[in-house]
Amino acid sequence: MRRTPTGFAVPLLTVAVLLTACSTAPDTAPRGPETSGSVDLTDPEQYGAVLEAGVNAARIEQDVPPLEHDACLEAVAVGRAKALVGAPELVHAPLRPVQRSCPGDTVAAENLSRTGRPPQDVVQAWLDSPSHRDNLVDGNLRRGAIGCVRDGGTAAAPVLICSHVFLG
């Protein structure tokens, strides 16, 4: 988890949970299926859609509005995940470039995962980690997107790196 308000540097905090080390306009339409049973979870894009739906379900359970899916943030999230392929640890890059790429908000945050586990396990791991949970249930973070890429594993059981970026 990393959060950066505009103009301030925030120390990096990486929590290892289920991890090996750890259009510019909002789209308010539902993103992806609500359950993992009807999609190919070996496909990074479909996995990310299910993960994003799980995050929004968790937000709703906590009486927090769902995040507005943002296509600009999705492209940024995929790029951030690609930059971590093969890295021994998941390390957050600075968040100011996210704010510059997808302007309009003053706070940015990110959750990362590297796993072959189902999306619901990632959501639960983030909820079980206080710093990651803070991002998931922060009502001030209103826009978000998840980008996932392959990082090993097999065709039938890939390991995926996912970046979930938030703005608010």
Image (cartoon, rainbow, N blue to C red):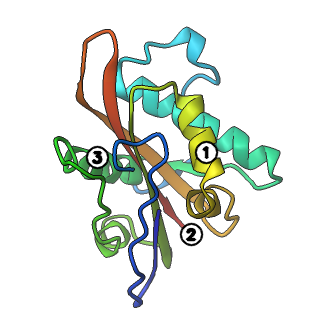
Identify the element where label 3 is drawn. Answer: helix
User: Amino acid type of disc 3?
Assistant: Ala
For the residues carrying marks 1 and 2, which lies nearer the camera in this image? 2
Image coordinates for residue 34, horizontal then vertical, percent: 64, 24
Which is more N-terminal, label 3 or label 1? 1
- Would residue 105 be found to the left or right of residue 42 on screen? right
Tell me if mark 1 has few (under 14), some (14-19) or many (20+) residues whose alpha carbon lies within 10 angstroms of its own.
Answer: few
Which is more N-terminal, label 2 or label 1? 1
Identify the element where label 2 is drawn. Answer: loop
- Would residue 63 be found to the left or right of residue 25 on screen? right
- How far apart in space, not on screen, are marks 1 and 2 (Cα)? 15 Å
User: Residue at position x 34%, y 15% from top?
Assistant: 157
Q: Which residue is mark 1?
A: 28
Which is more N-terminal, label 3 or label 2? 3
For the residues carrying marks 1 and 3, which lies nearer the camera in this image? 3
In the picture as drawn, the residue positioned furthest to the bottom comes out as 7
- How far apart in space, not on screen, are marks 2 and 3 (Cα)? 21 Å
Marks 1/2 in contact by CB < 8 Å: the verdict is no
Vertical arrangement, residue 58 with respect to residue 158, above or below? below
Marks 2/3 in contact by CB < 8 Å: the verdict is no
Image coordinates for residue 72, horizontal then vertical, percent: 37, 53
Image coordinates for residue 28, horizontal then vertical, percent: 61, 45
Disc marking residue 71: none
User: Amino acid type of disc 2?
Assistant: Gly
Q: Which residue is mark 2?
A: 168
User: Amino acid type of disc 1?
Assistant: Thr
Q: Which residue is mark 3?
A: 81
User: Residue at position x 33%, y 75% from top?
Assistant: 96
Q: Is residue 92 at least partly visible in the picture?
A: yes
Image coordinates for residue 165, horizontal then vertical, percent: 44, 56
